[in-house]
Amino acid sequence: MSLSNRVSGEITPEQSAAIAAAFEALKTALAPVLLISLTAEERMASLKMGDKTIAFVNKTMEYATQSPSLVPGYVDLTEAKKDHKLASYIYALYQQINTLSRGLEDTGMVAGSEAYEAALVIYYSIKGASRSNVTGTQAIYDDLKQRFPSRGKRIDSPL
């Protein structure tokens, strides 16, 4: 075990409250447009805009605006432009949130790994102390042993 310390930080109660308020403000601000909840099937069946298709849609909307006679009568260009603008904004916002999410995930993973590693070292120290009959350690070991993440019983495969 390395017991490296790649992350060391705290989030104060004030910071926690500010973060919660910022999330609430973001949810409130986005509530009027975040009205859709797709099923798995709908997600699979939907056309998706990504880096490559954004350029295509941008250019198509430019041409449609410049030459409205090329737009079929059954296409509502005003609504298409509105959808395009919303999709572009949401995509940019999603990229920012995705970056934030990845940072949270990575930092949480490292902090959790370091905490778990330290807990394992302490657990095995307590286990050794209880085996050596150090006073008061047996009850601690018995309590921790119940909470220790077991890998389950190994079943030998006949193959």
Image: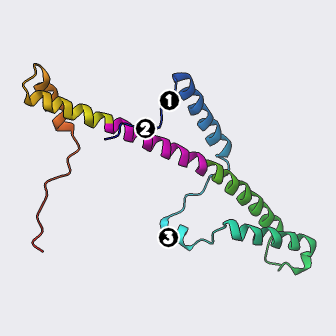
**Does residue 101 belong to the magenta stretch?**
yes
What's the magenta region?
98-117
- The kind of residue tagged 2 is Ala
What residue is drawn where x is 56% and y is 73%? 45
The crowding category of the residue bearing disc 2, from other C-alpha atoms within 10 Å (few below 14, some 14 to 19, many at least 20), is some
Q: Residue under circle 2?
A: 111
- Dot label at residue 9: 1
Q: Main secondary structure of the magenta part?
A: helix
Q: Is residue 9 left or right of residue 95?
A: left
Q: Which residue is mark 3?
A: 41
Residue depicted at 59% across the width and 71% down the height = 46
Q: Is residue 59 left or right of residue 95?
A: right
In which quadrant is the N terminus drawn? top left
For label 3, the SS is helix
Callout 2: SS: helix
In the displayed structure image, the side of residue 8 where residue 142 appears, left or right: left
Q: Position of residue 131 (x, y in %)?
A: 8, 31
Q: Disc 3 and disc 2: Cα gap in Å?
A: 36 Å
Marks 3/1: CA–CA distance: 42 Å
